[in-house]
Amino acid sequence: MRAELLIIVALGFLGALLGIIQAFEAVAKASPEIKQVLLAQGISVALISMASGLMALIPSAGFVGIAASIRASVAPGPDASEG
């Protein structure tokens, strides 16, 4: 399950990088009058992507932790069979 959490984080960062790239490409090609608007839009995409990744990651990590603790309390340990 930890691989899935890593994928969630990676997708959030990928979205952030793509948003920043989009912002700087737009600024490089735009007329001076609209550069600020395009830069702000690109940064907004980056921040929304990163926030979305974190909003998916935080509850998922919590569920993974809860599931691991339940599994540990239900499954017998290596010493239980020697009993």
Image (cartoon, grey):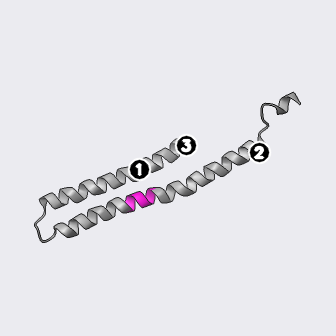
Element under label 1?
A: helix
* 79 shown above or below 2: above
Identify the mark nearer the N-term, 3 or 2.
3
Which amino acid type corresponds to the residue marked 3 in the rendered image? Arg
Marking on residue 2: 3
The Cα atoms of the two marked residues, 3 and 1, are separated by 14 Å
Q: CA distance from mark 3 to mark 2?
A: 20 Å
| Label 2: which secondary element | helix
Q: Nearer the viewer, residue 79 or 38?
A: 79
Quarter of the picture containing the C terminus is top right
Could you tell me which residue is drawn at 41 percent across and 50 percent down? 11
Q: Secondary structure at mark 3?
A: helix
**Sequence-wise first label, 3 or 1:** 3
Q: Is residue 31 above or below residue 71?
A: below
Residue, x 25% and y 53% (percent of image)?
A: 21
Query: Is 43 left, or right, of 80 in this rendering?
Result: left
Specify start and end residues of the magenta stretch as a single range: 48-53
Q: Mark 3, residues whose alpha carbon is within 10 Å: few (<14), some, or many (≥20)?
A: few
Residue 45: mark: none
**Mark nearer the viewer, 2 or 1:** 2
Up-down relation of residue 31 to residue 12 (above or below): below
What's the amino acid at mark 2? Ser
| Quadrant position of the N terminus in the picture | top right
- Main SS category, magenta section: helix
Distance (Cα) linking label 2 and label 1 = 33 Å
User: Between disc 2 and disc 1, whose residue precedes?
Assistant: 1
Question: Residue beneath label 1, please?
Answer: 11
Residue 73's tag is 2
Left or right side of 70 for 31? left
Residue 21 part of the magenta-drawn span: no
Q: In the image, what residue type sits under mark 1?
A: Leu
